[in-house]
Image: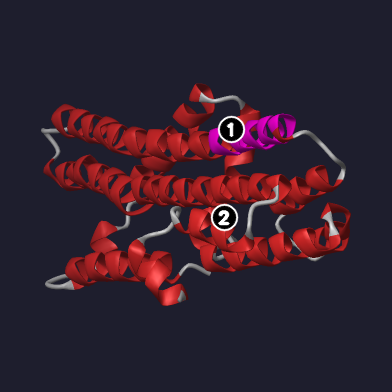
């Protein structure tokens, strides 16, 4: 579970709800028609904008907002250095057992391709092609959330227009002005809150996670190719350290 995401949700919504409750009741801000306009309109517009397969796929990608399953860079470097030592001592075929202990499918696949004797150029092409498709899936997931973040305020404006029209049509009935104005204002409020506290931050988190995962997988590709070429473990370690910040390098020593 990602702590920063949970803290962000708790702090963001907590402060907004606290501000809403000061000087009045939270019931003032609960309006079912407004919620229907914003949520229904946002979901409907998103379904029109993207194929159903992409919408279903983004549900799986969205888990990355809350859960971080990615291996630590330091651990991956250590594993690659150990693999290099085994390869130089016992040969590449001895790495088959090592691959079985690796939980990351991409990492394990790279090791098995090397064990199977795939040429370095072909191995690099296969892994980089898979990495490109992973990046595309993540990009699409972030894009859908960004799109929802742009639709939600727009749907809020639609609700505002609906509320204003109702208010103007019923100006002769003072008792109807209040409810109509509530729809006009609360719908915009819902759209802005959903966009800026859920959809856009989720898109930003997915972009950050994707960049981090791509960098780690590039490190893995570089490490596997170095092992395959028979580089010295010390040289391999120094090469892989170029993928991480100087601060992390010092912490690893």
Residue 35, x across and y down, in percent: 38, 46
* Prevalent SS, magenta region: helix
Question: Which element carries disc 2, helix, strand or loop?
Answer: helix
Residue 77, x across and y down, in percent: 58, 63
| Gap in angstroms between the C-alphas marked 1 and 2 | 20 Å
Residue 205, x across and y down, in percent: 41, 52
Q: Residue at x 71, y 35 (%)?
A: 120
Segment tinted magenta in the rendering: 121-136
Kindly check if marks 1 and 2 are in contact, taking CB atoms under 8 A apart as contact. no
- Depth check: give the residue in front, 108 or 207: 108
Mark 2 crowdedness (10 Å alpha carbons): few <14, some 14-19, many ≥20: few
Mark 1 crowdedness (10 Å alpha carbons): few <14, some 14-19, many ≥20: few
Q: Residue at x 26, y 45 (%)?
A: 192
Name the N-terminal-most of marks 1 and 2.
Answer: 2
The quarter holding residue 163 reads top left
Residue 191 counted in the magenta span: no
Residue 135 counted in the magenta span: yes
Q: Is residue 125 visible?
A: yes
The quarter holding residue 121 reads top right
Q: Which residue is mark 1?
A: 132
Q: Which residue is mark 2?
A: 63
Q: Residue at x 20, y 28 (%)?
A: 165
């Amino acid at each position: 579970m990602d702590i920063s995401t949970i803290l962000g949700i708790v702090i963001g919504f907590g402060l907004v709800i606290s501000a809403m409750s000061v000087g009045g009741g939270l019931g003032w801000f609960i309006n079912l028609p407004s919620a229907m306009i914003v949520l229904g309109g946002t979901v409907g517009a998103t379904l029109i904008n993207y194929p159903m397969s992409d919408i279903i796929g983004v549900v799986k990608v969205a888990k990355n907002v809350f859960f971080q399953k990615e291996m630590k860079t330091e651990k991956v470097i250590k594993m690659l250095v150990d693999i290099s030592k085994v390869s130089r001592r016992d040969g590449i075929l001895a790495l088959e057992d090592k691959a079985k202990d690796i939980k990351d499918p991409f990492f394990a696949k790279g090791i098995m391709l090397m064990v199977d004797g795939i040429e370095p150029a072909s191995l690099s092409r296969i892994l980089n092609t898979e990495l490109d498709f992973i990046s595309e899936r993540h990009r699409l997931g972030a894009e859908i959330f960004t799109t929802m973040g742009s639709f939600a305020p727009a749907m809020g404006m639609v609700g505002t227009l609906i509320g204003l029209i109702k208010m103007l049509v019923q100006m002769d009935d003072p008792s109807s002005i209040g409810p109509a104005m509530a729809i006009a204002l609360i719908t915009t409020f819902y759209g802005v809150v959903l966009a800026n506290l859920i959809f856009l931050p989720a898109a930003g988190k997915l972009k950050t996670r994707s960049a981090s995962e791509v960098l780690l997988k590039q490190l893995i590709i570089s490490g596997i190719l170095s092992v395959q070429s028979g580089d010295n473990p010390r040289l391999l370690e120094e090469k892989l350290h170029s993928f991480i910040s100087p601060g992390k390098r010092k912490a690893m020593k």
